[in-house]
Image: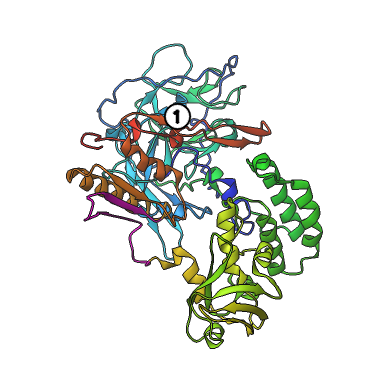
Amino acid sequence: MKRLFSFSPLLLLFLLTSLACGVISNPTPAPTSEQVATIEPSSPTPTPLPPTEIPTPLPAAPVQPGAANPDEPVFITGDIPYTSPFFVNTLNDPLVLLEDQAGFVARDFEFEFKLEGQVIGPVEILEDDTVVYSLALPAVPQGTFVDVDNNGQTDTGVQVFAVAYWSNTWGGPFLETRDAGGWSGGHVSTVVDSERDGEIVGGIFVVWAPDAAQAFPTGFGEDAMLFTEDDPVAPIPAGYNLVSLDETPFRVWKEARPVITLNEGSGAVNDFSEMSFVEAFDALFAKASREYPFTEEKGVDWQALYDEFAPQIAEAGNNLEFYALVKAFGQRIPDGHVGISFDADDFFEKHGGSFGMRLAELSDGRVIVVEIFPGYPAEGAGIKVGAEISTWAGQHVGTVLEGVVSYLGPYSTVHAERQDKVLFLTRYPVGTEIEFTFSNPGESAQTVTLEAEIEYDSLFASIASFGFDELSLPIEAEILDDSGVGYIRISTFSDDYNLMAELWERAIKTLNENDVEDLIIDVRVNGGGSLGMATDFAAFFFDHEVAIGLGSYFNDLLGDFEDSPDMRQCLIGRSRNPDKEGRK
């Protein structure tokens, strides 16, 4: 599901320093002298021009494509580059939309795309994971007419479109309120500036004029904002036109089969991969220390961290050493949403060995063996389920636990970190010998020295998410026989969004049909994912709009955080809950 300005959280991505990103700009044919004209700009004013509500007429197309007009646009194709790891979750039921830009003209973040005006095209994933699209243009589009010629008179106007990628998550084959609104900020033919409340600052529009008597801006004007009263304008040819906002004056041309690469936008991963280790770390640190939103709440001393890690980074001799240092840097930020991608070689080198036993810490501080795996050193030493570990490496086991650093961190809560400290107490490089003391139930204490072998059974058994069947559904529901209570388990918010939406709607509908009044929603062992999906689910329990949070992001222009103009992802209720009748 794509939403207006759905910025990928920095705290999820800011340590991914090696992913590549890029936006490809396709050259466009040079316009003829008749196709571009300029006028003197009028005095600037930032007041947006509202779209008119004139219904689209159904005349014959003003320009007939074919031999008489070989350049009249009829079919658009292109690539959809992506670097964000979340993008793949939207690829089950994707489409491109001839997206009505009347929402941007009016700066209306809640603008809804009319069903009758939606022109969609297919998206394909090629064998090399390249994503491409195609879009056939209708003879007479059914978008919203906007009068943007600044002549002070009411004119028919033009229809302004962008080519935009969408994921159809909810409902039928077309987009509905829960899927779409406003104007696209990413994976779109335009370039959107998230620092300026989503202002369109470049890229390509598709503009349709019903006749040759309409005009369109040829520049941004002195206020650097499009579709305001200071825009210079010029006549625009009838029919479809491609308008490049990247040139001065805007380039206007016709091309039967243009190729337009969509821009990923602000969700693209920051690319430091071409930098040296020192340059990459400095760039990472500069961005993280400035844009991390919870510095005060988490008590992060950025300068102290830099002073500690920068000299070590300068000494890093290879990729694995650099990776280990960046991971250690991230571990020092007590936030479970900070992370770096898993490196199997690094993990094996540090924690590939263990002894074939799983431990648990009780509320009174005792450490107990809860599972023994056959064929490993713990079984050979006679350790049994229920055995208590009293000392480890010559110290009290509780003292040793305090100093354990889990490879799976960092953590937002002490209790979550403590559980993984117990897990990593027994994980060492292969071949490491550890002396410890244990007492089997009803037996006296014994001290043994065991050598760590390659062993992952205890690791997988300790991490609940490894217990899920890969073929199981992300959402499962049932009515508990003994009580009649409804039960829904949501194991993730980062699976196939379309599938999750269908499973959720089906579960809620079935529970209502069976007059279930009590419901348990189980989100234990949920790895997280899309906040938008979670709020969509919550909307089913409201018949009105409810504010549940305030979105904000770091604005480079202001040098500070500001409220996000897109509040849809922070609101649930009326606009996300069609067909509310019968829902409890």
Task: Quickly name the residue at label 1.
Answer: 109
Task: Examine the rendering and report whether any part of residue 212 can be seen.
Answer: no
Residue 94 position in % (x across, y down): 36, 50
- Please name the residue shown 59% across and 18% down the image: 40
Apparent side of residue 193 relative to residue 121 in the rendered image (left or right): right
Task: Examine the rendering and report whether any part of residue 29 can be seen.
Answer: yes
Say whether residue 482 is magenta. yes
For label 1, count other residues whose C-alpha is less than 10 Å away and answer few (under 14), some (14-19) or many (20+): some
Q: Amino acid at mark 1?
A: Phe
Q: Which residue is at the front of the view, 319 or 152?
A: 319
Among the 4 quarters of the image, the one containing residue 54: top left
Residue at the top extreme?
A: 152
- Please name the residue shown 51% across and 33% down the image: 550
- Please name the residue shown 54% across and 88% down the image: 380
Q: Is residue 541 above or below residue 422?
A: above
Q: Which residue is at the front of the view, 115 or 350?
A: 350
- Magenta range: 469-491
Q: Which residue is at the front of the view, 426 or 538?
A: 426
Label 1: state its secondary structure: loop
Say whether residue 267 is magenta. no
Residue 476 position in % (x across, y down): 30, 56
Among the 4 quarters of the image, the one containing residue 512: top left
Residue 472 position in % (x across, y down): 33, 63
Apparent side of residue 518 relative to residue 424 in the rendered image (left or right): left
Residue 356 position in % (x across, y down): 53, 79
- Please name the residue shown 39% across and 37% down the image: 99
